[in-house]
Image (cartoon, rainbow, N blue to C red):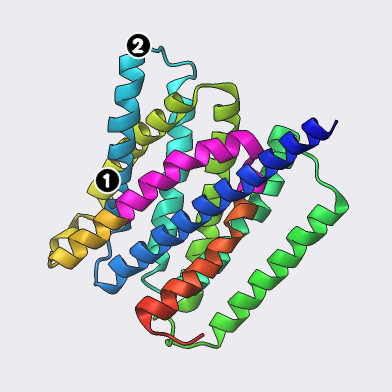
């Protein structure tokens, strides 16, 4: 009995540490994306497409080496990738209008969406206290919106527009997280990540050619911009590599709850790199 309890405790500690590692990496993604926006680059799709290419290249190569057949129909992966691309686009776009802190706080809306989606589509049930805790989080995030409504342009040119983009992006992220949770629990993790990268790259290429070519032409490329995008790509690749482990072990809702501490890291980044007082 004591052995079982110790094993369960170690498993919980491992999940907590893994969740906090993912949380730190997410904060790093947010910081580098904000840095790209501050350098005058308005190309959210371009920022993400390198990550999808890296995922397809690395994990697709592993899939080919294993000579493993695809276990899930391609159109499910296309839908999963479409939701993920829209989430990345909307959140990255939000940095053009609002602050790093507001974005990292409001992306916690993903928790509320994940609870609703897992309840209806995966059959997950939550206690009244869990729902009460989620409701408190939503009320707190509503206060962020009210705060930004009175900020003016101090933390962004159009903070309410930026906040709205983040909330819309979290809905797509929740769809992606819940879909990915279902896939990694039923199918092979390598397949899921590689197909997400492949179809995410295709969707990004189509949207980039339609919406972002003019923005790219206006960018004055520099070493700082290239390094910022490279940092964003590396941190996002690490994030997508770790996410399937957490989703498989703990589920989409617990995964998003683990990401709450990314707000703390975002504040640290904002203080030390942007020299801003909160």
Quadrant of the drawing holding the N terminus = top right
Q: In the rendered image, which residue does mark 1 sit on?
A: 50
Q: Give the answer, above or below, for where 39 lies relative to 120.
A: below
Report if residue 248 lies within the magenta region: yes
Report if residue 67 lies within the magenta region: no
How crowded pointer 1 is (Cα within 10 Å; few <14, some 14-19, many 20+) is rated as many
From the viewer's perspective, tell me whether residue 148 is left or right of residue 158: right
Q: Magenta residues, as a range?
A: 232-255
Where does residue 76 sit, x and y in percent of width and height? Answer: 49, 27
Q: Quadrant of residue 223?
A: bottom left
Q: Quadrant of residue 132?
A: bottom right
Q: CA distance from mark 1 to mark 2?
A: 25 Å
From the viewer's perspective, tell me whether residue 179 is left or right of residue 220: right
Circle on res. 103:
none
Camera-side residue of 165 and 34: 34
Q: In the rendered image, which residue does mark 2 sit on?
A: 67
How crowded pointer 2 is (Cα within 10 Å; few <14, some 14-19, many 20+) is rated as few
Where does residue 215 sit, x and y in percent of width and height? Answer: 21, 62
């Amino acid at each position: 009995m004591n052995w079982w309890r110790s094993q369960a405790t170690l498993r919980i500690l491992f999940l907590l540490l893994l969740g906090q590692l993912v949380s730190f990496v997410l904060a790093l993604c947010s910081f580098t994306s904000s840095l790209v926006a501050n350098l005058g680059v308005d190309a959210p799709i371009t920022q993400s497409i390198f990550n999808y290419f890296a995922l397809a290249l690395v994990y697709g190569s592993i899939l080919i080496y294993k000579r493993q057949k695809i276990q899930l129909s391609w159109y499910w992966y296309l839908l999963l990738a479409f939701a993920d691309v829209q989430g990345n686009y909307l959140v990255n776009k939000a940095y053009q209008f609002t602050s790093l802190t507001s974005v990292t706080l409001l992306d916690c809306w993903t928790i509320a969406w994940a609870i609703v989606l897992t309840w209806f589509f995966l059959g997950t049930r939550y206690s009244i206290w869990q729902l009460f805790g989620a409701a408190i989080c939503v009320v707190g995030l509503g206060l962020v919106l009210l705060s930004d409504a009175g900020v003016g342009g101090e933390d962004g040119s159009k903070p309410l527009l930026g906040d709205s983009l983040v909330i819309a992006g979290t809905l797509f992220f929740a769809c992606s997280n819940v879909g990915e949770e279902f896939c990694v629990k039923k199918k092979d993790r390598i397949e899921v990540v590689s197909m997400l990268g492949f179809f995410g790259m295709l969707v990004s290429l189509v949207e980039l050619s339609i919406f972002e070519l003019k923005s790219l032409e206006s960018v004055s490329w520099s070493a700082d911009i290239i390094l910022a995008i490279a940092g964003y790509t590396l941190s996002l690749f690490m994030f997508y590599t770790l996410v399937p482990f957490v989703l498989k072990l703990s589920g989409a809702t617990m995964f998003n709850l683990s990401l709450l501490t990314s707000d703390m890291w975002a504040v640290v980044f904002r203080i030390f790199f942007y020299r801003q007082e909160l």
